[in-house]
Image (cartoon, rainbow, N blue to C red):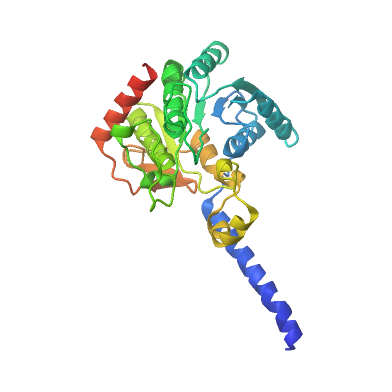
Amino acid sequence: MSTSLLYLLVPVGVGVGLYAIRKLREWQWGWVRNSSSLRGKVYIITGANTGLGFETALALASRQATIIMACRNMDRAGDAISRIRQTTQEGELIPLELDLASFESIRKFAEQVKGRFPSFDCLINNAGLAMRTPQYTTEKHEIHYGVNHLGHFLLVDLLKDNIRANGARIVVVSSKMHEKGRIDFEHLGQWMERGPRDRTNNLYNNSKLMNFYFARELYKQGYNVHVLCPGLCHTDFFRDYNPRWYHYVLFSPIVLFFLRSPRQGAQNIIHCATDNVNTEEKNPVTGYFVTNVQQTKSKTKFDEETSERLWKESFKAINA
């Protein structure tokens, strides 16, 4: 074999190998295979104009569902609808304004839903954020606690009668980062600076743990609730961190082995919204959540006292 041919075959072989590894990872992450019609079903999706919410809306609309797109910015909601319509003409897409950083906006949204769509089938609590600098909600709650947890807590509370009457599903988008979170009741709703040894956003991690505790309490109260981690996805979720092109180069091994497309990450949301079944052994109370389109046991040791106290503190906050 000539040297020049060897120089050609080596990079080709490496490229083929990396491509095969990537495809194997995508297969392991899983895909929703059910494509049955969802005509007549109504899904509410918070943050439906971008990222995972957009892909979820697109997939469910393609299956003829009615989608209430709960979005903070109506112009962006309209752009999202236009993009969905470039792919499918199926389903019905209804944009409604919702700012999870404002109790007033949440209450207004809930009244619109109860007035126009009282018989919805599923509420997907998808919207969330991660910030580097101190930011607060209208009610002066730290933004991760206020939006990722408290905003959805209030939304579910306002729609609880409809949810119970319809037997509607509640989908809670958490994250595997909940395993790194902790509930600090002394500083609940306050901004806390990252320590010198902190490698991740603790406030984000804490809010994702709150999401899981929220789902656990809902399940104990008899709601049909499903909690999930979509995986590390390439969306604009971390736009506040302003990643540069060289970050992707430096972290290319992570990109190859762990970074999912928004469409792939949304499979876990779609599965929870349509097909996932909780059992006596595998449910939020027993510490199970959906990732890779299957039930997975959390490493977190959930504490019942913490679970109940967080519920009480959250309820107090939304009624302050």
Which picture quadrant has residue 175? top left
Q: Is residue 185 left or right of residue 200?
A: left
Along the viewing direction, whichever of 257 and 238 lies nearer the viewer: 238
| Residue at 58% in and 35% down | 53
If the image is split into quadrants, where does the N terminus sit?
A: bottom right
Q: Is residue 35 visible?
A: no
Query: How many discs mark residues in the rendered view?
Result: 0
Q: Is residue 194 visible?
A: yes
Q: Tell me if residue 207 comes above or below residue 299 in the rendering.
A: above
| Residue at 50% in and 19% down | 106
Extreme residue in the bottom direction: 1
On the image, the x and y values in percent for residue 44 come to: 55, 25
Q: Is residue 280 left or right of residue 173?
A: left
If the image is split into quadrants, where does the C terminus sit?
A: top left
| Residue at 70% in and 73% down | 12
Q: Is residue 181 left or right of residue 39?
A: left
Extreme residue in the top direction: 115
On the image, the x and y values in percent for residue 97 come to: 59, 21
On the image, the x and y values in percent for residue 224 come to: 41, 29
| Residue at 32% in and 46% down | 300
On the image, the x and y values in percent for residue 254 come to: 54, 58
Q: Tell me if residue 137 comes above or below residue 297 in the rendering.
A: above
Along the viewing direction, whichever of 85 and 99 lies nearer the viewer: 99
